[in-house]
Image (cartoon, rainbow, N blue to C red):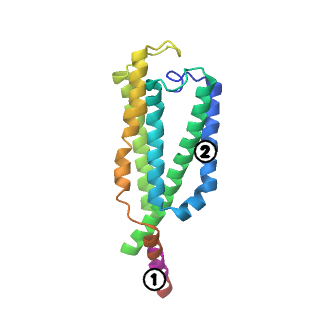
Amino acid sequence: MNTFFWGFGTDELSDLLWGGIFGMVSSILTIKPLQAKFEKRDLILFALTFITVLQILKVSFRFAGWLPENGDPLLLQIFVFQTMLMGYCGSLFLMMYASMMADIADDQELKNGLRQEGIFSGGITFAGKVTSGFGLILGGLLLDLVIVFPKGLQPGEVAQDILIRMAVIDGIIMPALNLIPFLLLLKYKLDRAAVRDIQNQLNARKQSA
C-alpha cells in the first residue's frame, strides 16, 4: 500500500517508521496518568477503535479526493502524523493487554488456587503465531486471487482498478474486522475496584497461610 498505492519511496518509508517510534515512546511516557484516570478496558477499546478509524479514514479520504496527490510533501506530513497516532494507540493497546492478562491471572488464582501465567503466556504466544501465519497466507491469497496484483511492475505501472481493490481490502474491509475483538473485549469485567478486591483477597490468603 505505501509503495504502490501511496507512492512513497525508501526515504519516505523511513520517516513513517520514525513517526511510529515517536508515537510508541509517547505512549510509554503518558501511560501512568492515563491508567490512573481510566479503566484498562476503556483504554484498550479506545485504542482499538482509534486505530480502526484511522485506517479506514485514510483510504476513504483518498477516495473522496480530500488528501493531497502522491508526491505532495503535505501527504507525507499527514502520514507521519497518522503513523505517530497509530504507534501511540498500538503501544497503548499492547500495554493494556499485558496488564489485563496479569489481572486475569490474579482472578484465576483466586478462583482455583493455581498461578497459571505460564498457561496464559503459552496460549497468547500460540494464538499470536497462528494468527500471524494465517494472516500471511490470507494476505497472499487475497493478492493473488482477489486483488490479482501483477508481479514485476514498478510503482506507477499498476492498473488503477487493481490499486482500488487493494485499498478497499487493506484499508476498509480488514480494519472493519476489528469489530470482532472489540465485541469480545466488552465482556471483560475486571475494573479497578474488582482487581483491588482480588489482590486484597490473595494477600489475605497468603498471610493466613
Check disc 1 and give the amino acid type: Arg
Q: Which mark is residue 205?
A: 1
Magenta stretch bounds:
198-204
Residue 16 in magenta stretch: no
Check disc 2 and give the amino acid type: Gly
Determine the residue positioned at 62% across, 42% down.
21
Are discs 1 and 2 less than 8 Å apart at CB? no
Q: Which mark is residue 157?
A: none
Main SS of the magenta part reads helix
Residue occupied by mark 2: 23
Image x and y of residue 77, in percent? 62, 31
Q: Nearer the viewer, residue 57 or 2?
A: 57
Determine the residue positioned at 44% across, 79% down.
201
Q: Assign a secondary structure to mark 2.
A: helix
- Taking the image as drawn, is residue 113 in sight? no
- Taking the image as drawn, is residue 104 in sight? yes
